[in-house]
Image (cartoon, grey):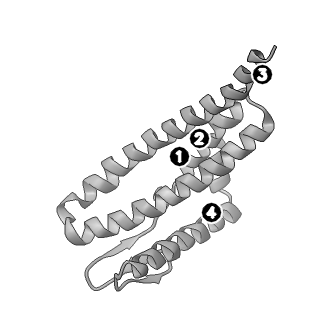
Amino acid sequence: MALLYKLLDIPFFENALYGYLEANAWLANAILLGLGQPTHVSEVMIQSPQFTMAIRRGCDAVEPTWLLCAAMISFPAPLLHKLWGIVAAIILLQILNLIRIVTLYWIGIHLPSFFNSAHVELWPTAFIVIAIVIFVSWKESSNRPQAHAEDKR
């Protein structure tokens, strides 16, 4: 995590993160448009006549993804299994983040009094739990091939 924060202090990586935030806003906006919401994007803002929200640093799934990948890298497993796990983890957490953004937009429109709790408490907790479930599932799958190899001896 220290390496991530150090990298984000470098202007190149900070700019790359901002581009990533913009991409999240555009992708979430595309989903919202597909769901019939009259939204548009301005930089990292998703806007509509009913609600506006900004995708900011910390709203990007970078930290839980980084932490999960670090756990996978540090776990004793075959390199190929680590690589597949990391790719799957990145994809799953990014999809989850888009779901988070879309649901927060919906909550902002329909349950505005719940928005802050969902944004600050519910979704961060969900990310932690889901990242743990992904890691445990991946870890268990890394033990299966070894168990099968021992059964054949």
Residue at the spot 67% in from the left edge and 61% down from the top edge: 13
On screen, residue 10 above or below 81: below
List the residue tagged with mark 1. Answer: 64
Of the two numbered discs 3 and 1 in the rendering, the one whose residue sits closer to the viewer: 3
Q: Secondary structure at mark 3?
A: helix
Neighbours of disc 4 within 10 Å: few (<14), some (14-19), many (20+)? some
List the residue tagged with mark 2. Answer: 68
Q: Name the residue type under label 2.
A: Leu
Whole-angstrom CA distance, mark 4 to mark 1, is: 17 Å
Q: Earlier in the sequence, mark 3 or mark 4?
A: 4
Of the two numbered discs 2 and 3 in the rendering, the one whose residue sits closer to the viewer: 3
The quadrant in which residue 81 appears is top right
Q: Viewed as shown, does residue 36 lie left or right of 141?
A: left
Proximity of marks 2 and 3: CB atoms separated by less than 8 Å: no
Q: Secondary structure at mark 1?
A: helix
List the residue tagged with mark 4. Answer: 14
Of the two numbered discs 4 and 1 in the rendering, the one whose residue sits closer to the viewer: 1
Whole-angstrom CA distance, mark 1 to mark 2, is: 6 Å
Q: Viewed as shown, does residue 38 lie left or right of 72?
A: left
Q: Viewed as shown, does residue 150 lie left or right of 96?
A: right
Residue at the spot 44% in from the left edge and 46% down from the top edge: 127
Q: Name the residue type under label 3.
A: Ala
Residue at the spot 73% in from the left edge and 28% down from the top edge: 145
Choose between 64 and 96: the one closer to the eye. Answer: 96
Image location of residue 138, percent across then percent down: 61, 36
Q: Residue furthest top?
A: 153
Choose between 29 and 59: the one closer to the eye. Answer: 29
Q: Secondary structure at mark 2?
A: helix
Q: Name the residue type under label 1.
A: Pro
Whole-angstrom CA distance, mark 2 to mark 4, is: 21 Å
Proximity of marks 3 and 4: CB atoms separated by less than 8 Å: no
* Marking on residue 149: 3
